[in-house]
Amino acid sequence: MPSMNTTETRKSSLSPAGRRLVALMQSTHFGRIESLSVRDGQPVFDPPPRVIRKIKIAAANGPRAETISKDFTLRKEMVEFFEHLEALGTGVVRCIEIKNGLPFSMDIEETVQG
């Protein structure tokens, strides 16, 4: 994967698993993704993560418009999120909070050595 520190990172520059995770966040719109495994900085879908969608009453709850687009420039929140996955390397993201189809916060499980 190319360095994420570019001014314009596109969805097409992500791995297939990265593109799948972007689509999952966009279709979730509001809610969270729990227990996402990460291997070598890449999301792993075996075992599948758990998705909890938040339904907002009297509001738009559908997926983001970009969901139907094959390629687009990633927003800074998404770029930073993938930088954190790369830094994690291998581990588990316990929870990714999604707001408006974008990662808002994440809880990472780490093992403290010795």
Image: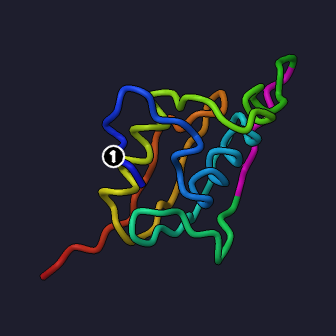
User: Horizontal and vertical percent for residue 78?
Assistant: 49, 37
Residue at 77% x, 25% y is 65
Residue at 40% x, 55% y is 85
Q: Is residue 84 left or right of residue 12?
A: left
The outermost residue toward the left is 114
Q: Is residue 59 left or right of residue 18?
A: right
Quadrant the C terminus occupies: bottom left
Q: What is the magenta range?
A: 51-57
- Mark 1: few/some/many CA within 10 Å (<14, 14-19, 20+): few
Of residues 57 and 19, the one drawn nearer to the viewer in this rendering: 19
Residue 18 falls in image quadrant: bottom right
Residue 41 falls in image quadrant: bottom left
Please, is residue 83 above or below residue 46 in the view?
Answer: above
Residue 34 falls in image quadrant: bottom right
Number of marks present in the image shown: 1
User: Horizontal and vertical percent for residue 52?
Assistant: 72, 50
User: Horizontal and vertical percent for residue 51?
Assistant: 71, 55
Of residues 43 and 49, the one drawn nearer to the viewer in this rendering: 43
Please, is residue 85 above or below residue 104 in the view?
Answer: below
User: Mark 1 sits on what residue?
Assistant: 3
Quadrant the N terminus occupies: bottom left
User: Horizontal and vertical percent for residue 31?
Assistant: 67, 41
Please, is residue 110 above or below residue 26 in the view?
Answer: below
Residue at 65% x, 27% y is 100
Of residues 108 and 21, the one drawn nearer to the viewer in this rendering: 21
Residue at 47% x, 60% y is 93
Q: Is residue 104 left or right of residue 70?
A: left
Residue type at the position of mark 1: Ser
